[in-house]
């Protein structure tokens, strides 16, 4: 009986163990590819983001964004020179459907799109594609996190200057009697 329960437990647990091993292998490949891209191009990553399907890094001194993605064992990598782009936007392609009384939004693709200064061609890095992955796993939040970082590196980025607060008198609580 004990042998049978151990066998059933191993049969049930083996797919989860294999998924964990495959996920770790995929993440290692993505990290290695990102590291190789940085070293080959003489870039230093000031900020990094690792996701199970892709990795992003930015070199603030050279104004370069490094992107690598592993999809169906095919690696897609690019280095984007941010000095030739004027803006970055979050692209979200979706389909709307109605389910009874509720409206549903099925997101097909999430990407960061870079609008060029001189040419009508835009560059796009895909963070999520419904053809490759079944559900979102934080890609919208990652896009929202990286957009302001990229905007600050674009040459025409306007940095909001926070006005200084004038010195105000501080309340002196030392003269208040303790009851």
Image (cartoon, rainbow, N blue to C red):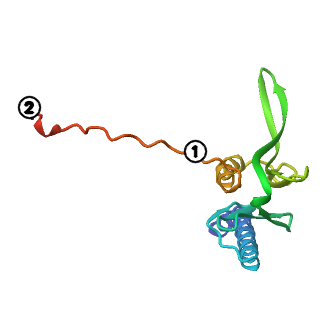
**In the shown orientation, is residue 157 left or right of residue 105?**
left
2 or 1: mark nearer the eye: 1
For image coordinates 77% across by 20% down, the residue present is 101
Dot 2 or dot 1, earlier in sequence: 1
* Outermost top residue: 101
User: How many residues crowd mark 1 within 10 Å: few (<14), some (14–19), many (20+)?
Assistant: few
Which of 154/59 is in front?
A: 154
* Outermost right residue: 120
For image coordinates 71% across by 62% down, the residue present is 56
Find disc 2 in the rendering and name its residue. Answer: 179
Q: Is residue 145 above or below residue 169?
A: below
**In the shown orientation, is residue 47 left or right of residue 175?**
right
For image coordinates 72% across by 74% down, the residue present is 38
Q: In this view, does 127 lie above or below 16?
A: above
The quadrant of the rendering that contains the N terminus is bottom right
Find disc 1 in the rendering and name its residue. Answer: 160
In the rendered image, residue 174, in percent from the top left (x then y), is placed at 13, 40
Which of 11/95 is in front?
A: 95
């Amino acid at each position: 009986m004990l042998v049978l329960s151990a066998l059933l437990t191993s049969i049930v647990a083996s797919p989860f163990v294999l998924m964990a091993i495959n996920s770790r292998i995929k993440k290692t490949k993505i990290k290695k590819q990102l590291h190789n891209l940085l070293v080959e191009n003489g870039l230093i990553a000031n900020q990094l983001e690792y996701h199970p399907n892709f990795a992003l890094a930015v070199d603030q001194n050279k104004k370069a964004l490094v992107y690598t993605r592993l999809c169906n064992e095919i690696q897609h990598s690019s280095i984007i020179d941010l000095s030739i782009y004027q803006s970055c936007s979050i692209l979200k392609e979706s389909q709307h459907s109605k389910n009874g009384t509720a409206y549903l939004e099925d997101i097909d693709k999430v990407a960061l799109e870079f609008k060029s200064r001189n040419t009508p061609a835009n560059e796009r890095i895909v963070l999520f594609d419904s053809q490759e992955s079944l559900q979102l796993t934080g890609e919208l939040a990652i896009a929202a996190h990286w957009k302001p970082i990229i905007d600050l590196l674009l040459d025409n980025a306007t940095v909001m200057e926070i006005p200084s607060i004038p010195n105000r008198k501080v309340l002196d609580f030392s003269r208040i009697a303790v009851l």
